[in-house]
Image (cartoon, grey):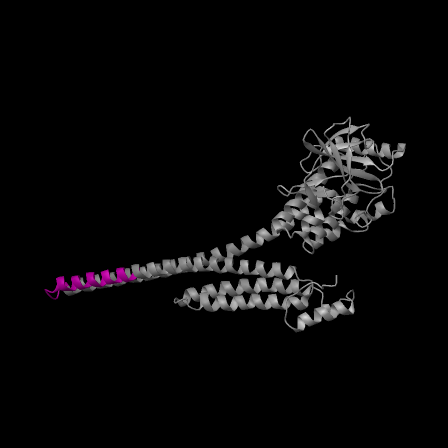
Amino acid sequence: MISESGIYNQKFIDFGGFDKSSEAVLLHSTSLSRLYRISLHGRHFLFKTPVSDDSFSLAMLRREYEISAGCAHPNIVNVLAFCETSPVGAGILMEYIDGRTLDIFLAESPSAASRSKIFGEMLSAVAYLHQRGVIHNDLKPANLLVTNNGNTLKLIDFGLSDTATHYLYHTLGCSPEYASPELRSRSEAIDVRSDIYSVGLMMRLIFQRRYSFISNRCTQTDPFKRYSDIEALQNAWNRRNLVWKISAGMLLLAVLSAAIVLLYMRQQRIQSETKASVQYIERMKRKVEAESMKADSTQNILDKVRTDAEFLRKERDQRLLEENERAAQCSLLSQKVVTYLEKAYRLSADSLSKVPYCDFGNNYLFHFNRMHDIYYRKEILPIADEQVRRHVKEVFSLRHYELFKVLVEKHAAMPSVWSDTSLSSEEKTYYEKLVMDGLPYKPYPGK
C-alpha cells in the first residue's frame, strides 16, 4: 500500500496481546483515518482506524464496515472483520493489496489493452455496488489500486458511501476535484449518477482524449443529462469499441471483395474464350466435312484441326494459371500492405499522443509519409505484373489516405506552444528553440 506521495510513512507499533510477533506499519494518514499494514502469523493485512476515537468517528467507521463487509467481488477489497480493540484502537481488518494507486500505474505508460482492462474492472466493481444499493461517493485515483501481480484493479475506501439505511454525511471529507457537483453542494438528491460523474473523470485520466464523447456526457453538470446507470455507460463504451473492430472488418471485407470481383471477371473472360474456341472447332469440323467430299486429304485436315485445338487448349490453360497466380498475388500483397500501414499508423499515433504540442507533431506526420514513400518504391513499384501493381497501389493509396487523415485530425486537435498561455516566458522560449532546431520534444527541465 502506498501513500499519496508514493513513499511509505514508517512507524512501527508493537501489538503485544494482538500477537507478540506482530507489528504495524503506518502506510497512510488523512484528516479522518489512518491505514496500517499489520503482520499476523506471517501474513500481511490492512487495518483502518479513525484519527479520533470519539463516538461519531467510531460510528462512521462501523458504518463503513457494515456497507463493505457483505461485498464479494474480485475488484473490491475484501473486508474481514471489525475489531473493537487493538493497540492502535478500533478498526477494520482487510486483505492486504500489494500494488500501487491508479495515477502511479498510469505513469508507467501501460498499453491500451491494459488501460481498457483496468477501466472495465472499475465499471464492473461500481456496477456491483450499485446493484447492492451502494453509492461509493469517493471514486478517485487514491481509492483505485492496481496489483503488482497481474495488474488487477481493487476498489477501496467506503467511508463516504451511501446506502438506503445510511443516507447522511455524504460529503464528509470527499475529494472536490473528483466529486460530482451535487455532492460538492451537499445536495439531498444523490443517486448512482454521482458515481458516473466520477467515472467520467477516471475515463479521461485513463484514456486522455479517447472516448471524449462518453466522458463528456458522464461529467455533465445536470445529473439528468448523464448516463442513467453504469449499464448504459458500459453499453456506450462497448459500442464505441465495436466501431473500431467493425472498421477493421470492413477494410478486410473491401480487400476480399476486390479479389472476388477480379476472380469473377477472370472467370467470365475464360468462359468467353472457351466459347470462341468451341465455335472455331465447330467451324473447322464443318470445313473438313465439306473438303472431304472434294479431296482425299481429309485426314491431313483433321490432323491440323486437332493440332490447332490442342494449341488453343494449352493456351487457355496457361492463361487460367496466370490469372489464378495473379489473383493470389493481389490478395497476398493487399493484406501485406494493409498490415504494414496499420503498424506504421499505430507507431506514428502512439508517438504523436506522447507529444503535448502540435509544433513537435509535424515530425511524426512527415515520418509517416516518408515511410509511405519508401515502402511504395521498395515493395510496390518493383511488382512486374502491371495489373497486380495497379490493384495493390489502389489499396495502398486508399488506406494511406484514411490513416493519414486520422493522424492529421489528431495533430490539428493538439495545442501550439505559441498559443499556450499557461507557459512561462522561459518555458515558451525553451520549447520554441526545440521546435526551431528541429529537435524532439523534451519536458522543460525547470519543472
> Picture coordinates of residue 67 (x, y %)?
78, 33
> Picture coordinates of residue 297 (x, y %)?
11, 65
- The vertical placement of 369 against 11, above or below, is below
Residue at point 87% right, 47% down? 185
Quarter of the image with the C terminus is bottom right
Q: Quadrant of residue 262?
A: bottom left
Q: Nearer the viewer, residue 417 or 202?
A: 417
In-image side of 42 versus 225 (left or right): left
> Picture coordinates of residue 11 (x, y %)?
78, 39
Determine if the magenta segment contains residue 183. Answer: no
Q: Nearer the viewer, residue 164 or 103?
A: 103
Quarter of the image with the N terminus is top right
> Picture coordinates of residue 71 (x, y %)?
72, 32
Residue at point 68% right, 44% down? 234
Residue at point 65% right, 59% down? 353
Q: Nearer the viewer, residue 214 or 124?
A: 124
Most extreme residue toward the top is 17
Most extreme residue toward the bottom is 436
| Most common SS among magenta residues | helix
For residue 164, say whether it is visible. no
Which residues lie in the magenta part? 292-316
Determine if the magenta segment contains residue 299. Answer: yes
Residue at point 69% right, 72% down? 433
